[in-house]
């Protein structure tokens, strides 16, 4: 079975790890947000691509939910004296990934090629694709002006009010090689429980992706990142509110309506089922909190079942 | 007193540290070899510039004679899986220097500017100048073809026979801003006990430097890196032999003859004095082994005295 997953960071990492753990003859392709890529210390950092690759390699740090385990921050400590920014927590082991990626990109390789090289080196068997080889950068307008995503998310800890979100470069970007083919040939397309505004939003902003989702023969199933009236983690709730979307699984259903077939959402929000249905999306209640590997596999299984 | 030192790596670091330790109202400018600069993991590494800056900052690792103390190699360990070269021992703390330098260079700053930024950050009070802002690369011809200096020195541990040495780019390079002025205004010019072929040679190959040394009013004093018939450290002896120069302080005197006034050389090689004199260079016997800070200061003092 060919499964395609659209993915952002932490929540997506858990779901794709769950899919990988199903051991059900899945052929998994993960299309990953690059809207929060950043240049740190002159290096090209792709937080979501790395989170997914590390998760699929079984190498994602369990405690933090990002980066590698047994990490140290020796380079970071040494950068301070040079007046280089130290708010982005780049670990020493993680840094090797960014050095390798940056070197490949400077040599003229595409982000797809660099991603493939990293995934292969980590022993990832699944296909990991950036959403685009062209730069798309999510930026957020605050009272102090526009912030890049990492400035907002890491430096400001997502504690500043956001008035608008833009995906700079998206209109000129093209889906990376393999993205539209994977969607077109999928048996099921999953939208991971990632931030709809800053994780899935940038992927959908790449010309051709929404059309591909709307036209694909496979069922498209999303897993809602919202429980009750807030996100399981991160600023998804606040950013949905900034967009004028209800902060609920109903809001998620409305954002994806038009091409989404089913929404797996938290069973305790069962009262939302009629509203989700009204948005033209089939509601599929489930236990969506992933606190263990078994939770991850169970939710992955439920999402695949929802596609049937 | 304005002292200008032409410098390479380890031996030079000791002598300039000795000069710094004299506390004699010295205004020290160090002109540093960049012929062994290398691109490692996509970063611009300047081993001699860093050795000098670290030494002047009091931050050079005492045991290794290069790099920073309390060093770790976490990034290096993590690079191996990406198939990136790991023969160049880039420490984590040291890596910050290269990241900072590379970022400044990519932003369009010159190597001089990057060097000034690093020296300032490290608290170096002396002036450290690269010999040139243009790339000059020392390469060595072996039975297996041409090697870059670091490939020869670090990867091959200088254990391969060298048939020829070239300074690629030297003819098109210009002295970095301040280099010729410093030499022209110096009260004394010191040539550090560095490899004449691969440390001092590249500096001399930059158009204008030899002419500046020949014309400057100040006495030019070299400290020989050779004791007996071999270098105190490193492959200087073998490289001088490859050049057809006698491996002795006499050979050093002959390489620098034409613009050198005095050569401070190992007292136990006193029998070489007539040959050095015959090369047109005033022989100044001294204890040239620097095994302690006091040795460094004593040799620095002796070199300055030799200029009188």
Image (cartoon, coloured by chain):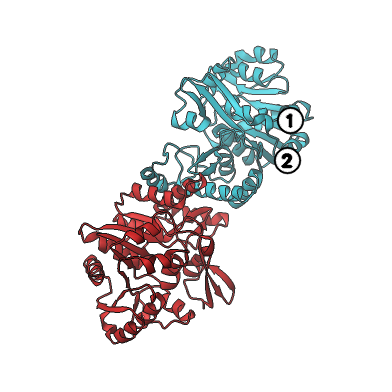
Chain colours: A cyan, B red
Residue B229 drawn at (x, y percent):
37, 83
Element carrying mark 2: loop
Q: Quadrant of the C terminus of chain A?
A: top right
Q: Is residue A104 visible?
A: yes
Say if B168 sits above or below A280 in the image: below
Instruction: Between residue A214 and residue B190, name the one nearer to us.
Output: B190
Q: Is residue B177 left or right of residue B156?
A: left
Q: Tag 2, which chain?
A: A
Q: Earlier in the sequence, mark 1 or mark 2?
A: 2
The image quarter containing residue A205 is: top right
User: What residue did someone put label 2 on?
Assistant: A178
User: What residue did someone put label 1 on?
Assistant: A208
Residue that appears at 55% across and 16% down: A241
Say if B58 sits above or below A192 in the image: below
The image quarter containing residue B306 is: bottom left
* Label 2 neighbour load within 10 Å: few <14, some 14-19, many 20+: some
C-alpha gap between disc 1 and disc 2: 12 Å
- Are the residues tagged 1 and 2 within 8 Å (C-beta)? no
Residue B212 drawn at (x, y percent):
40, 64
Instruction: Between residue A269 and residue A218, name the one nearer to us.
Output: A218
Q: Is residue B211 left or right of residue B284?
A: right
* Label 1 neighbour load within 10 Å: few <14, some 14-19, many 20+: some
Instruction: Between residue B119 and residue A168, name the one nearer to us.
Output: B119
Residue A92 drawn at (x, y percent):
45, 48
Element carrying mark 1: loop
Looking at the rendered structure, whether the residues under marks 1 and 2 are on a common chain is answered as: yes
Residue B28 drawn at (x, y percent):
29, 58
Disc number placed over residue A246 in the picture, else none: none
């Amino acid at each position: 079975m060919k499964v395609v997953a659209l993915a952002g960071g932490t929540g997506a990492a858990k779901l794709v790890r769950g899919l990988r753990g199903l051991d059900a003859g899945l052929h998994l392709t993960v299309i990953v947000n690059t809207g929060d890529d950043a240049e740190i210390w002159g290096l090209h950092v792709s937080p979501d691509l790395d989170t997914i690759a590390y998760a699929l390699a079984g190498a994602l740090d369990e405690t933090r939910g990002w980066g590698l385990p047994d990490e140290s921050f020796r380079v970071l400590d040494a950068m301070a004296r040079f007046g280089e920014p130290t708010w982005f927590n780049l670990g020493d082991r993680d840094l090797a990934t960014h050095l390798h990626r940056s070197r490949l990109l400077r040599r003229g390789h595409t982000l797809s090629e660099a991603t493939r090289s990293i995934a292969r080196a980590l022993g990832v068997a699944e296909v990991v694709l950036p959403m685009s080889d062209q730069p798309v950068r999510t930026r957020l307008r605050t009272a102090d002006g526009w912030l890049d995503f990492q400035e907002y998310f890491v430096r400001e800890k997502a504690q500043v009010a956001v008035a608008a979100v833009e995906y700079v470069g998206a209109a000129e970007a093209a889906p990376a090689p393999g993205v539209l083919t994977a969607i077109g040939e999928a048996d099921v397309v999953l939208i991971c429980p990632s931030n709809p505004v800053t994780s899935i939003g940038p992927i959908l902003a790449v010309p051709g992706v929404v059309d591909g989702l709307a036209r694909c023969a496979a069922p498209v199933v999303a897993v809602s990142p919202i429980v009750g009236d807030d996100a399981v983690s991160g600023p998804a709730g606040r950013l949905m509110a900034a967009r004028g979307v209800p902060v609920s699984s109903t809001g998620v259903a409305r954002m994806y309506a038009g091409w989404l077939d089913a929404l797996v959402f938290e069973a305790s929000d069962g009262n939302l089922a009629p509203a989700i249905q009204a948005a033209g999306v089939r509601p599929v209640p489930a236990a969506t909190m992933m606190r263990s590997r078994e939770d991850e596999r169970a939710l992955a299984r439920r999402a695949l079942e929802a596609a049937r």
